[in-house]
Image (cartoon, grey):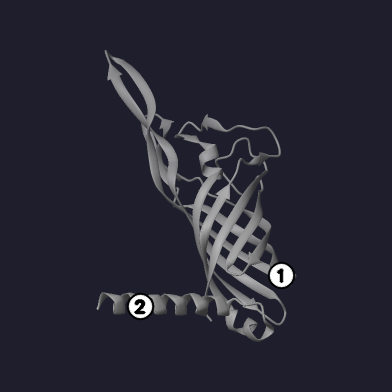
Amino acid sequence: MKTKKVLIISLISIFLLQFNSNCFSQSDEKKEKKALSLFVGMDFRVTPVYLNSKNIYFTNNHVFYDEHLHLAGARLTYGLQLNHAKWNLGIRYSQSLRYGHVYYKRNVKDTSHLYAVTYNDNVQRILIDHHFEFYKKFNLKKFDLKCLLGYSWMNRGSEYYYTQYLGNNVFVPKCSDFRYSGINIGVIASIQNWDVGLNFYYIGPGEHRFIQPQQSIIIPEIKLYYNFCLK
C-alpha cells in the first residue's frame, strides 16, 4: 500500500514538472500558452549611489532612523506578467515585501531629575513596494532577454505620528512617512523557468521626504525569480 502511494505521488510530481517545463518551452507552437505567468523570488538592493553629498544616519527632530535600511536590503517579491508572443512585448505588476526597520522609538527617562533621551527601541513593520513595468523581449539562442522600463512606489506602510510643539502650550498632531518613488530600468535574462536580472531605481529629489539634503539617488538591485505558467 505504501509503495502504491509513493508511486502515485511520484507520477503526479513528474506530471506537474513536465507540464510546467512544456509551458515554458522555446518552440513557437508553445509560446501562445505562456502569455500569463506568475513569478516569485527575491530582490537584493545594494548600497545606494548618492548623486550629491551623502548623509546616511541622522535625526529629523521627530524620529531617529537609519536611512540605509530603508533603501537597501533583501525583499520577497511576487507578481504577474502578461506577454504578447507575436510582438514580444509585455507588462508586469509586482509587490515586494520587507519586514524590518522603520525608526527608533524615542524614550525619555527621569534620572535624578535629569532627563535622559535614548533611541534604543527599533520599531519594525511590514513595508510594501509596488512596481509596474513594460518590457520588450528579445529571443536569443540560449536565453530570452527582457528590457524593462517602469515606475515604483516604495516603502508603503511606513507612516508614523508625532506631536509638534508650536509654543504657548499648543501641540499639533502630525503624520509623516518614509515613502519614496522613482523610475526603474533594467534587464532580465530568462533561462527556462528562471529569471536573473539587474535593475536600477532613479529617485529624484521631489520623490522622497526623508533623505536629506534633498538629492537624487540611484539604487542598484539584483533580481532572482522563478516563473509559473498560468495560461
Residue positioned 63% across, 35% down in the render? 213
Position of 197 compared to 17: left or right?
Answer: right
- Against 187, residue 33 (above or below) is below
Residue positioned 57% across, 69% down in the render? 193
**Mark found first going from the N terminus, 2 or 1:** 2
Nearest to the observer: residue 140 or residue 99: 140
Q: Disc 1 designates what residue?
A: 136
Quadrant holding the N terminus:
bottom left
Mark 2: secondary structure: helix
Mark 1: secondary structure: strand
> Disc 1 residue type?
Lys
> Disc 2 residue type?
Leu
Residue positioned 55% across, 75% down in the render? 21
Residue positioned 71% across, 68% down in the render? 142
Farthest residue toward the top?
112
Nearest to the observer: residue 190 or residue 170: 190
Q: Disc 2 designates what residue?
A: 7
- Against 34, residue 201 (above or below) is above
Nearest to the observer: residue 206 or residue 81: 81
Callout 1 environment at 10 Å: few (<14), some (14 to 19), or many (20+)?
A: some
